[in-house]
């Protein structure tokens, strides 16, 4: 192993920079050259690869986003685009690649693996939607950002005796909504994995009012609908003052938490170590707080398990 590449792909996530820093520094420590690939798979196609030295990753561990840039590159999915990427990788004599991204990025990584390029995937997405791992890079930071917002909205919600809907990210996976709802004391969590009727939601709001509650918080995952429509539907049924907030991209930016910096640092170093040991075509994950690796083909076949216990607990505690 003489030269490896590193790229970030899909949605950015806090902690990606910590992982890039660890890849570069651990590789140099292991006497390996590192190429930083710009804008995800687009950089492979456009031959945008630059040698990274120790200082190229200085002062980034605390920053959100990704210094390499990222992209949702449709061309990489085509035979022609993929062919160009392979040619460039061979021309640059890249012996292995570390891909930091989510499910889509890992499908690209699997294709590279199948084409004979040893690949290690580091899970980087705020959605936490990968089945094989407990946590993905960025999830913890996004969760804390959401909690901070729930706290602020709760204050004003209570003063005005309102119902507040907070729409959070998560197209197919409700983890952000579920865990922020549980930790933020929400009355209702609306997620794709456990649909709830509008009548059911109205019942919870009215029951809370009858018990003397001053406000209700509904955390809605974007994959379950949109906040504006939900407000409308509630107002059609019951006479309560409803407001909504769509948190949007503030969830994806910002300084990574200690957890995400540690995870990024550990996974970045582990990724290099595996490639040096001749182990490729794997993805990294966490189980019981420890970083482990798993075959990429196996990992991508797994189905995410829904945490019913957390969902039920949210309901019981927010009565
Ligand atoms: N089936 C696929 N084959 C090859 N590349 C893919 C495939 N699916 C996704 N990708 C690549 O991974 C990129 C990121 O995927 P996307 O689903 O947008 O984000 P994420 O990795 O965060 O899930 C895509 O833009 C594309 O370049
Ligand atoms: O940046 P875009 O393309 O608007 O994507 C927004 C989507 O990306 C995410 O932030 C994260 O998704 P991925 O990390 O899976 O790409 C979603 O929660 C959100 O719906």
Image (tube, grey):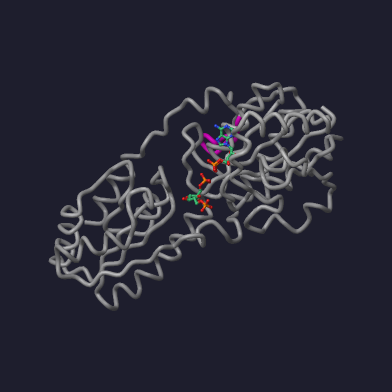
Left or right, 112 with reference to 294: right
Q: How many discs mark residues in the rendered view?
A: 0
User: What residue occupies the far bottom of the structure in this picture?
Assistant: 159
Q: Main secondary structure of the magenta part?
A: strand
Give the quadrant of residue 203.
bottom left
Q: Position of residue 94 (x, y in %)?
A: 80, 31
Magenta part of the chain: 283-291
User: What residue occupies the far front of the structure in this picture?
Assistant: 80
Q: Residue at x 53, y 55 (%)?
A: 141
Q: Position of residue 2 (x, y in %)?
A: 85, 30
Give the quadrant of residue 86.
top right
Q: Residue at x 24, y 74 (%)?
A: 161
Q: Nearer the viewer, residue 199 or 319?
A: 199
225 within the magenta span? no
Give the quadrant of residue 112.
top right
Q: Position of residue 87 (x, y in %)?
A: 77, 29
Left or right, 244 with reference to 64: left
Q: Residue at x 61, y 42 (%)?
A: 73
Q: Residue at x 64, y 45 (%)?
A: 264
288 within the magenta span? yes
Q: Nearer the viewer, residue 207 or 9?
A: 9
Q: Position of residue 26 (x, y in %)?
A: 78, 40
Q: Quadrant of the C terminus?
A: bottom left
Q: Quadrant of the N terminus?
A: top right
Position of residue 254 relative to residue 280, above or below, is: below
Position of residue 15 relative to residue 109, above or below, is: below
Position of residue 215 relative to residue 249, above or below, is: below
Left or right, 201 with reference to 249: left
Q: Nearer the viewer, residue 154 or 296?
A: 296
């Amino acid at each position: 192993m003489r030269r490896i590449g590193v790229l970030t792909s899909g949605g950015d996530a806090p902690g990606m920079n910590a992982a890039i820093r660890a890849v570069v520094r651990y590789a140099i420590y292991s006497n390996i050259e590192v190429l930083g690939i710009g804008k995800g798979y687009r950089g492979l196609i456009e031959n945008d690869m630059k040698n990274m030295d120790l200082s190229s990753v200085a002062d980034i561990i605390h920053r959100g986003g990704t210094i390499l840039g990222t992209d949702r590159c449709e061309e990489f999915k085509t035979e022609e685009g993929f062919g160009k990427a392979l040619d460039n990788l061979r021309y640059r004599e890249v012996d292995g690649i570390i891909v930091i991204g989510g499910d889509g990025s890992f499908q690209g990584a699997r294709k590279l693996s199948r084409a004979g390029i040893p690949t290690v995937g580091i899970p980087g997405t705020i959605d936490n939607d990968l089945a094989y791992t407990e946590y993905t890079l960025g999830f913890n930071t996004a969760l804390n950002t959401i909690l901070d917002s729930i706290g602020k909205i709760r204050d004003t919600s209570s003063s005005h005796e309102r119902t507040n809907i907070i729409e959070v990210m998560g197209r197919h996976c409700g983890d952000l909504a579920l865990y922020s709802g549980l930790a933020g004391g929400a009355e209702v969590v609306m997620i794709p994995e456990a649909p709830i009727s509008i009548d059911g939601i109205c019942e919870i709001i009215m029951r809370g009012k009858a018990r003397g509650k001053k406000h209700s918080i509904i955390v809605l995952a974007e994959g379950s609908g949109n906040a504006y429509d939900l407000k409308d539907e509630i107002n059609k049924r019951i006479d309560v003052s409803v407001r909504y907030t769509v948190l949007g991209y503030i969830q994806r930016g910002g300084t990574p938490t200690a957890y995400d910096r540690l995870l990024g640092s550990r996974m970045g170093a582990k990724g290099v170590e595996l490639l040096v040991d001749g182990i490729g075509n794997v993805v990294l994950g966490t189980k019981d707080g420890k970083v482990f690796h798993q075959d990429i083909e196996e990992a991508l076949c797994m189905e995410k398990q829904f945490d019913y216990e957390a969902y039920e607990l949210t309901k019981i505690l927010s009565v």
